Image: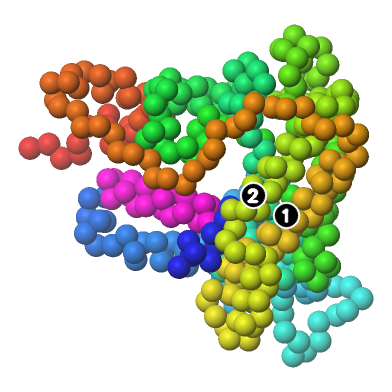
Amino acid sequence: NISSVLEGSPLLGDIQKHRRDLESLYDEIAWELPDFGQMVSLADFMHTYCMVESHSHAKHEGNESSPLMVPLLDLINHRSRGANLRLGGSVEGELRLAAHVGRHAIAEGDELFFTYSEENEASSKFFKQFGFVDEDLPVASKVSFPLRPHHPDYSSKRLLFDESLVHTKLMLERLGGDDAESYLGQNSGYRDFPKFVIWRCSPESAGFVAQTPEAAHEELLPYARFVVFPRGTEALRTECDVTKRPPACLWPLPPAEEAAAAQFLVEVVREHIRRYPGSLEDDERMLRELSGKRSPEAPYLRIRRDERRCLMTLLQQVEGIASTTSEAPMQLPREPERTTRKPRSAPEVTTRELGYSWLLFLPALLALGCTARSCWRRMCKAPRHIE
């Protein structure tokens, strides 16, 4: 059960989204080729797609990357350190497989190794594509630091995020109204305006050391100051850099506000750690029990354990920032308690009551439910066969 062994991990959401994307792709192909859906089941399509995806690599030219399949290359095992083969550059449009020539030549009978991963690629991303964990790749934890409705000047601060995010969030808010959380659930986060951070650590063999610990002071703390800044929009524009999206307050705030910013970081990181089930010690124990058993759960559990270990280094950094504040943090308005209750069902509405009000939701359905291409195919395009 992937949902169980990856509980709390951002990788679970990535896998679920990938599945939904493949289901949409299957539907699009079946729309274009009516016989396809009868000849190929969704399960067979997904299995075949993933087989191809897990045996493909990428060709990089400038800032562009494209999928690449090389015959026989999938027979060569992966090694992120000490690989003795590489994909060479293209010669007259032909991509060649070239052996490294250096201090250590490839002796007759030596096994060949090729590096599947990109430089500094996270082990979880690599695992998602190829299905096994490379213990030499760095660990990455994705953390969301959200501006929430209880923060000071939320209504004006949210407009200072990326324009596309603001547009989408405000559209959802207008369509959902004041009662939206009753249907979406209090944990939906649809009113949150997040800053996402990828926190990277070295692999277990190197001790899960944070790769850029200075980012906690140089990137996260300036953003946290913006979140807790309590003295109005005009003062914010004067004291902080609002040209950034989201803004950053590069200079220390008054002591109580500075302490509140540090406390915000600590609370968010702890919140992410609490999303994982049980304790880190439980994960360590289960991994030891599964060691050597070739259990299908083991790689998922390892990803989860590694992310938690990496998050602990982030927690150490933000707690270190909090320990340097000399005053108690200023009191922010209390955030409404987030529960795990299921959202209630929408009330039943009769056809007479509904009237034409469904048209109000059409823009959201178009923006969120399908791409422009699939909408054109499914809603606007004329049928292929007309009697």
Other residues around mark 2 within 10 Å, as few (<14) / some (14–19) / many (≥20): some
5 on left or right of 205: left
Mark 1–mark 2 Cα distance, whole angstroms, equals: 8 Å
Q: Is residue 25 visible to the viewer in this orientation of the structure?
A: no
- Across and down, in percent, residue 36 comes to 26, 56
- Across and down, in percent, residue 192 comes to 57, 32
Residue located 73% across and 19% down the image:
230
Q: Specify the label residue 311 is tagged with.
A: 1
- Across and down, in percent, residue 228 comes to 73, 26
Q: Specify the label residue 352 is tagged with.
A: none
N-term-proximal mark, 1 vs 2: 2
Judged from this view, the residue extending furthest toward the left is 387
The magenta stretch spans residue 16? yes
Q: Which residue is mark 2?
A: 272
Residue type, label 2: His
Residue type, label 1: Leu
Residue located 73% across and 61% down the image:
309
Residue 133 appears in which quarter of the rendering?
bottom right
Residue 207 appears in which quarter of the rendering?
bottom right
Residue located 42% across and 22% down the image:
178
Indicate whether 106 appears above or below 310.
below
Q: Are marks 1 and 2 in contact (CB under 8 Å)?
A: yes
- Specify start and end residues of the magenta stretch as a single range: 11-32
Judged from this view, the residue extending furthest toward the top is 234
Residue closest to the eye, 79 or 194 = 194
Other residues around mark 1 within 10 Å, as few (<14) / some (14–19) / many (≥20): many
Element carrying mark 1? helix
183 on left or right of 251: left
Residue located 84% across and 40% down the image:
322
- Across and down, in percent, residue 210 comes to 82, 55
